[in-house]
Image (tube, helix red, strand yellow):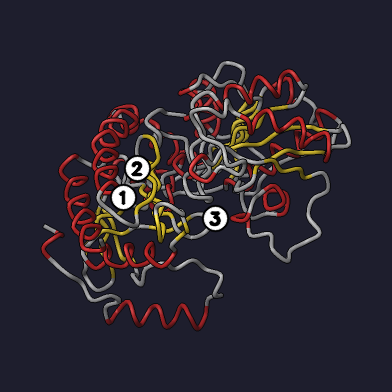
Amino acid sequence: MIADVRMKLPGPNSKKYLALSKKYEPRCMSQQTPVVWANGKGVKVTDVDGNTFIDFTSGVLVTNVGHCHPKLVAAIQKAAAELLNCYDFPTPNRVNLARKLVEKTPANLDNAFLLTTGSETTEAAMRVAKRYTGRHEMISFYGAFHGRTYGAMSMGGKMGGKKKFGPLMPGAIQVPFPYCYRCPFKKKAESCKLFCLEFMDTALNAQSTGDIAALIVEPYQGGAGFIFPPEGFLKSLETWCKSNDILFILDEVQSSFGRTGKFFALEWERLKPNFLCVAKGLGSGVPTAALMAESGIMKCLAPGEMSSTTGGNPLSCAAALAVIKIMEEEILAGNARKIGSIMKPRFEKMAAGSKYMGDVRGKGLVMGLEFVENKKTKEPSEKKTTEFISRCAQKGVLLGKVGIYGNVVRIAPPLVITEEEANEALDIMATIIADMG
């Protein structure tokens, strides 16, 4: 049992690699826990010192089918021995993946534009929306994260990393997101009647020139702290877009491929966006992404106007096809719902007895634990968040930290996690929460 140990981190080999990293890599690289990974299998990872951990990060919501799933490894090995890239020519893997993605998404999304990263998909969606509509303005939300490239960064909130990178993309308009635990309008969720949606008209009257091409939104805000909107908000938002002749871009880079307990998060409210951005879990470790779109919209581009050097390469497509097959065969979206239904009540029980865990939110196997200094004032506590993550790592559970205030613990294990593995990690966390007070 991992819970029986207490590790002194970093170990000697980790110290060596961390020193090299500090010398040769820029400080902007993320490093929250002093652990250097060596290998992984399923939900377990081992560092260069031989310490084993339960991974509750999924490599930032990427390895949905678990680390080094044997069927995924086999598919990658086979593809690597056949063909790595071809750019201008279609391959069976690329065409078959495009067909499979079209079959899995809403009927209106009948084109799959294969790319490499999530940022590429959001950039592509915005570019196509502007070309198709002939308009230039884009709407996004406070707290949004759509990537770190120029357009994506411009549409992001604080987590988008746009400080001192101006001037930003022209026409970027932002409105409040329903962060119910910290409502920007100081309203109560049970009585506000989606006031933030109503406020959008007021915000646009003040900011827009009347030239809006599209709106981009995440099903839940990942970088801002796993903030989930109230039920019905996204469907109402989709309706609002249609009534205002605004294209609807759904950014499921984080939330897709079983993470919320459905293959795509849009299934919870039967959304039909004009564009769907997917990545991360699609390749489960192999850089793979796709922009799903309506063919009637994509026809606004001439051949060769948009492409990606390694997007849709045979190896990444083989990996994505294997991931989808694994998810279907092992019913991983269902497992995310099942294990999530076990984990969330336990986190809520921890929060009820804790002075510092102020909010528990999430769905499936994606949850946020928000830490505060005082539950009444809700003052964010990055210090307590960091302490919790550090102590969990020492006992064998790896967690990540996110949030506008850096005070939210990210709960996102691979979807292959078993009930036994989940409870082992939960036991560790419950002990630490109780010890913290």
The residue where tag 3 is placed is 404
Mark 1–mark 2 CB contact (< 8 Å)? yes
Secondary-structure class at tag 2: helix
Picture quarter with the C terminus: bottom left
The residue at the far right in this view is 209
Q: In this rendering, is residue 292 above or below 253?
A: above
Does residue 44 appear left or right of residue 116 in this picture?
A: left
- Per the image, the residue denoted by label 2 is 72
List x then y, in percent, for residue 31.
44, 68
Image quarter for residue 126?
Answer: top right
Q: Amino acid at mark 2?
A: Leu
Q: Position of residue 250 (x, y in %)?
A: 60, 32
Q: Mark 1 and mark 2: span between their CA atoms?
A: 7 Å
Residue most extreme to the top: 107
Does residue 151 sit above or below 177 in this rendering? below
Direction from residue 26 to residue 246 in the image, left or right: right
Q: Residues within 10 Å of mark 2 (few under 14, many from 20)?
A: many
Nearest the eye: 353 or 119: 353
Instruction: Give the farthest residue toward the front.
Output: 376
Task: Tell which of 169 and 95 is nearer to you.
Answer: 169
Q: CA distance from mark 3 to mark 1?
A: 32 Å
Q: Residue placed at 49% from the left, 66% from the top?
A: 30
Up/down of 433 relative to 339, above or below? below
Q: Which residue is the site of mark 1?
A: 68
Q: Which badge, 3 or 1, comes first in the chain's sequence?
A: 1
Q: Which is more toward the observer, 306 or 60?
A: 60
Name the mark nearer the viewer: 3 or 1: 3
198 relative to 269 in the view: left or right: right
